[in-house]
Amino acid sequence: MIMASGFSQASEMAEIEGGTYIPLYGNDSLPVSVENFKIDKYPVTNKEYLKFVVENPKWKKSEVKALFADGRYLNHWKNDTELKSDELENAPVTNVSWFAARAYCKWKGKRLPTLDEWEYVAMADKETADARKKDGYNEFILSWYERPKSFHQEIGSTYENYWGVYDMHGMVWEWTADFNSVIISGETRRDENQDNNLFCGSAAIGSSDLMNYAAFMRYAFRSSVKGNYSIRNLGFRCAQDTNEEENSANEAL
Amino acid sequence: MAILNLKFKSTTITFLLSSLIIVFTSCKNDDEKTKDPEDVKVSQTMNAELTAPPMVPKPTGRRKAKKLVVDMEVIEEESEMTDGVKYVYWTFDGTVPGSFIRTKVGDEVEFHLKNHPDNKLPHNIDLHAVNGPGGGAESSFVAPGHEVVFSFKVLNPGLYVYHCATAPVGMHIANGMYGLILVEPEEGLSEVDREYYIMQGDFYTKGEFGEPGLQPFDMKKAIDEDADYVVFNGKVGAMTGDNALTAEVGETVRLYVGNGGPNLVSSFHVIGEIFDKVYVEGGDLVNENVQTTLIPAGGAAIVEFKIETPGEYILVDHSIFRAFNKGALAQLKAEGKENKKVFSGKIEEGIYQPEGGGIQEMPVDEEELAASRPSEKPGLEEKMELGKNIYGRTCVACHQANGQGIPQVFPPLAGADYLNEDVKRAIDIVLHGKSGEITVNGNTYNSVMTAQNISDQEVANVLTYIYNNWGNNGTEVTEEMVKAQRRN
């Protein structure tokens, strides 16, 4: 439906009106303020990333430093400039490290969204800015966790949310600037004890439990990665402060 | 061992303590066997033999403690829950349960846990055989496309569960992330003729039992503990028909039985056998002559029995609706000479008795049935296909994969005179159930078949499938014929 327009405007950004929200984790679950900002409507695609690599050879698969990207960097590309045959140009680029994603955004005159900005936008479903208590919203996320190879989709294939942003859920994980600011030890039962309200609070089973599960796995994933990890299900999109304009002049890196 | 026990008791009787320690240490010098497992030196390195269920690695026998390298990979993949039903499993090594790990007291295990690059989630492993916080979970937390290595020394003999403990733990376990690790005592377990690996698990799907297609995990049902499937080794029929376990008369069979849960406790029972020995909860305590042993979620037991007489033995969770309605059923086929002293050949199978002589009928939601009905009339080929699926989940447990039944217990359908001579009677039995004595191909059976809660069209399909297989007379049963037999 939106495919045709989607591709041509892939780098378009959506204006996000700031506000406060209570994140699941961190900051003692106090409300967090998010300023007005802009965020890419779609995740960055293989095609867009190729342009970046061509103009910034140090991010080529063959030249990247292991410190900034591990051995799986662009593993689904045949070589420095070509995708493997069954990969899609307009699918989100994955197997990119946090350092690479950050460099890409900088090259675009943008930056990675903060964890709070990302979570703020990701709370929305089609109709509401904060849909976290809706069963349908959470079920969609939970079912995505179980769908193998969902990275193999073109951008725009999931839904457009309240802010006009696509694919926040149901496609790939996404890097955030401060992805590991909330650390989950990986020993979840211990983590749970740190916040009894999350899992031990009540015997009633409601949408808030589903919400916790859906978000918990996202935080757990973030805690399992390091900046140079390149992972098949992990891509990114960029953000920008509202007063800045896109800078296609492309700062050299 | 006696000296060790004494030492423990003496902790409250302080005046004895010092003298006992002297006894203990002097004995320790004389006898290697009383050595604290912690101090056991390992000599060589070896790669652990890992096996997919229902197989078990070779016994550790008399080998010395070693450094044992275990290599496991986490794989998220789609597979079949039962005929026509798909499910996305999260697994250790691609099977549910994961590979069986066999160790010996004193072994130093070097554990390599890999998370397949295409996986979406981080995983870890908590081994109940580990002494240490989280059972290794914290040190084994690994992102997709990465590998972690950690090590531990096994100190306590027994059969232990391992599982993934990443958030949310319940969901990882519910999707199949569990398995067993055996720690053999220094002298090894006694020799037996056969060993098998079985693990029960409960599954929660969006659709009800048997609803076809790819079924997503249902978190709400899992929290409510409302299981759609309760199965051995990850799917319905993992060990039935051609995949049945085998043994010969006179052999002693040892089963390593675990329960992954996530929720349900198993009443593990083998129909037609008494366990000669049960290592209760997988520990040191041995009980003898046990009919049914309780296996908690996240627990295990070792059971042993000698096969005295040939035939089919059915492994069930004796919380019996799980066996006949949710899949918790496996088979052990024993071949060999009849032993009339032990088994006369005529028994009354007890498992259905609790339901009484009366046949229970389940309420039918007519609207739901109407909705599930295909709009067009299916052709013979389609009916056969649909019928096969229904047979696979509804009939196969008793009547078996090729309609051969189970001698003396469940009558055959293959080439069965009783079936072929009266189609109306056959429809009536499927719809309304049957109890009491019947004669099929010259053999008498006295059992109970419950009324089947399936639609007219489903009855037509499954009976058409049965009538057009295994040397039966080729009758095509129609929906109208079924409707005519409904008693309203």
Image: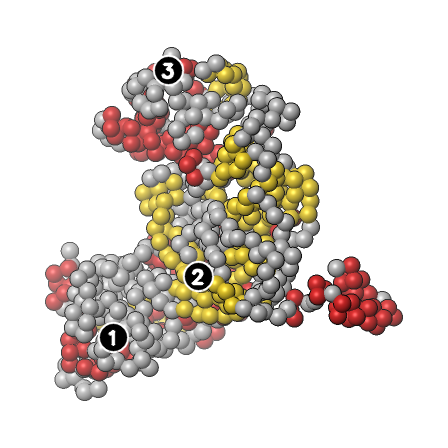
| Amino acid type of the residue tagged 3 in the rendering | Asn
User: Share a chain, discs 3 and 1?
Assistant: no
Query: In this rendering, is residue A101 above or below B227?
Result: below
Which mark lies nearer to you, 3 or 1? Answer: 3
Mark identifier at residue B72: 2
Which element type, helix, strand or loop, lies under badge 1? loop
Residue B256 locus on image (x, y percent): 56, 48
Q: Marks 2 and 3, Cα distance to the nearest angstrom?
A: 52 Å
Tell me the crowding category of disc 1: few under 14, some 14 to 19, or many 20 or more residues within 10 angstroms, Cα based: many
Residue B406 locus on image (x, y percent): 49, 26
The residue drawn where x is 48% and y is 57% is B49
Which residue is under mark 3?
B420
Whether residue B81 appears in this view of the structure is: yes
Which mark lies nearer to you, 2 or 3? Answer: 2
Report the chain holding disc 3.
B
Residue B219 locus on image (x, y percent): 43, 52
Mark before the other along the chain sequence, 2 or 3: 2
Which residue is under mark 1?
A238
Which element type, helix, strand or loop, lies under badge 3? helix
Foreground residue among B300 and A30:
B300
